Amino acid sequence: MKLQRLDLWLETAPGPLLPQLLAALGEKGEPLRWAITAAEPAADGEPGWRRLRIEAVLLCP
Amino acid sequence: MPVSPLAPLPTLLVIPTGIGCQIGGFAGDGLPAARLLAAASGCLITHPNVMNGAALYWSDPRLHYVEGWALDRFASGALALAPVRQQRLGLLLDAAIEPELRLRHLQVAEACRATLGLAIGPVVTTDEAVGVSLCAGPSGVSWGQLAAPATLLRAAERLRSEGASAIAVVTRFPEDAGSEALQAYRQGGGVDGLAGAEALISHLLGRHLGLPCAHAPALAPLPLDPGLDGRAAAEELGHTFLACVLVGLSRAPDLVELFSADDAAGATTSIATTNANAAPLRAGLLHPSQIGAVVAPAGALGGQAVLSCAERGIPLIAVEGNPCLLAVTAEALGLKALKAASYAEAAGLLLALREGIAVEALSRPLPPLRPL
């Protein structure tokens, strides 16, 4: 078992954020601790779309 | 079941650790705010770094001490909390702690048994050094790394098998007495550089064991600093940071699984009904469907507990008077929030929610009714 740090920018669609974040993190490993550390509107300016920076530590086998 | 206006309004208080919060970002300096919000709500659930003031602590039956991993699971609907009279505390010590520092920690545990009547023991030492290192993320938030996480889990399993119902863990942290970051922290600026690694350790143990867990770092004493900020001063009263952890855990609620982590990840609005596979609910259980509000710094709304609550419509109180490194606001995330200039104002908002007073009726101009 090891802990792996992750720094990820994610573009999210309108609607609840949590399922989108957990799905993105789950593709990389099991998130042990994470947080959104920056949030900005998506580059194309579409309402509700966002770019989020997520810093995390994942649990990897 | 009807709810009395006098009934408590279970409330989560989140002050994320290691992000430089001006209130709660130091040595238990979120505790006055927690005490106030506990009085206003009648039931406050918060995490150890809000409550832990090294040698200083406060015990209040309205305050529930829940480690961050379990707090996230409670907020997401996967866990319930069962208040207890007393936990039996297993003490987990890192093999890297030097003999004299180890003895200091054992004497704190003995003092808490003799002076406070806490149930402590057994004590287990890891079979190798945990190897804690500290680092900062790109945002400046504190993080850490563990060279041997599995040794913690092995030691914690021994404690559980010997009857411990909660785990106090002490690991040797690297000394950085001369660093600019530590000097800034002691003088009331910057970020608590230890906090990120501490949270990893307690999250790891909580996830593995399903028991209440909390961490204290083992460090050599620092030289006297005449410019020490009062918010950091609690950490310089003694030789260890362990007393507050033992007191906090001694009445930390049991963690009662309602459904699996995978189910919790998909949970949105259905937690009011208990999953068919869940254990029968115990009397007096604090169920996540009872959460009435969540309070967090206005710039730090991007954590799991806050998002879980806000996205299922639980009122979110964003405290603007607690600035931090981050600017992850309600507007930036598209969340609805009640704004509070201070924790005193947040307490007023909790009272309004508890009493069933419409918050918009408390300020002027009163927004007009909106015909559909």
Image (cartoon, rainbow, N blue to C red):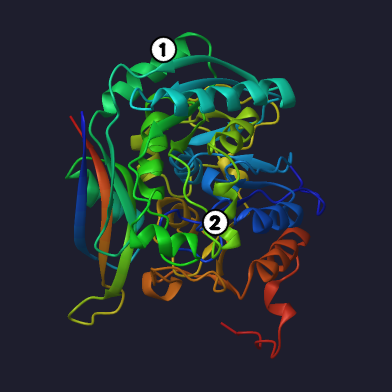
Indicate which disc residue B232 carries. 2
Could you tell whether B76 is left or right of B196 in the image?
Answer: right
B68 or B246, which is in the foreground?
B246
Q: Which quadrant of the figure contains the C terminus of chain B?
A: bottom right
User: From where the camera sits, is residue B111 visible?
Assistant: yes
Q: What residue type is labelled 2?
A: Ala
Q: Residue B238: which quarter of the image?
A: top right
What residue appears at the point 44 percent right and 31 percent down from the top-left corner?
B170
Residue B343 drawn above or below residue B16: below
The chain to which mark 2 is attached is: B
Question: Where's residue B279, x and y in %?
Answer: 53, 22
Residue B326 horizontal/vertical position (percent): 38, 68
Mark 1: secondary structure: helix
Three-letter amino acid code at the position of disc 1: Arg
Q: Quadrant of the N terminus of chain B?
A: top right
Q: Is B149 on the left or on the right of A9, as rendered?
A: right
In the rendering, which numbered label is found on residue B158? 1
